Amino acid sequence: MKRLFILILCAFPAFAVCAQQITRFAVVDTARIYTSFYRDSRSVRDFESKKAQYQAEIQRMTDEIKGLRQQKVDAETQGDAAKSARLDAEVSSKTSTLLDYSKAKNTELDTLKKKLMTDDDFYSALYDQIKTIAESDGYSMVLSLQSGNSILWYSPTVDITDKVIREMTSKQ
């Protein structure tokens, strides 16, 4: 009986230590927080305008390629091999141009977005607010949804984005 009591007594601290090491984590959507605070700024409006302009141009180019592909199918149906070959070459050329354009504009937008999001004052305040909320709510880890390529799923109950926005808004 004494041995059992001593064994249980020795095992109890090990269970207590394991229970204390459970990691609680939260996620935060920093892009949503950023747009909540800066959507009215000129630089963000310019970014959004360029983004819409580039998307419209990509859509126009895509529609043009679709039209050319349909013309090629029609030419093949009519048995016009020369026209079909010419259209095939044009589709290939325009597809290559579209891919290059899309890649260049996405790189440009990524650069602009990173530049917008490196406002040190804003991110310092954001970091401080996330730290405060994480410590007060008992989270030992907060993951960003933007840089979390490995986050495949998360429960909405761990998303503290709205809480961070409320707290930052109340401090303005």
Image (cartoon, rainbow, N blue to C red):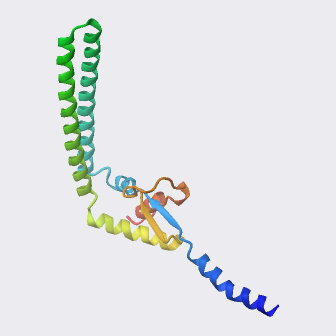
Residue 163 x %, y % = 48, 61
Quadrant, the C terminus: bottom left
The residue furthest right is 1
Q: Give the residue drawn at x 74%, y 91%.
A: 6
Q: Is 67 displayed left or right of 4 in the figure? A: left
Image point (68%, 84%), residue name: 12
Q: Return the x and y of residue 114 as percentages of the image width and height.
A: 26, 56
Residue projecting furthest to the bottom: 2
Quadrant of the image occupied by residue 93 = top left
Image-based side of 171 in relation to 100, left or right:
right
Q: Residue at x 47, y 53 (%)?
A: 152
Residue at x-position 27% and y-position 66%? 120
167 to 21, vertically: above or below: above
* Residue sitting farthest toward the top: 78
- Which residue occupies the foreground of this view, 64 or 163? 64
From the top left corner, tell me how far across and down residue 156 is, in percent. 53, 54
The one of 33 and 97 positioned closer to us in this rendering: 97
Residue 169 to residue 74: above or below: below
Point out residue 146 in the picture as x, y percentages from the top left corner.
Answer: 37, 55
- Asked where in the image residue 115 lies, by quadrant, the reply is bottom left
Q: How many marks?
A: 0
Image quadrant for the N terminus?
A: bottom right
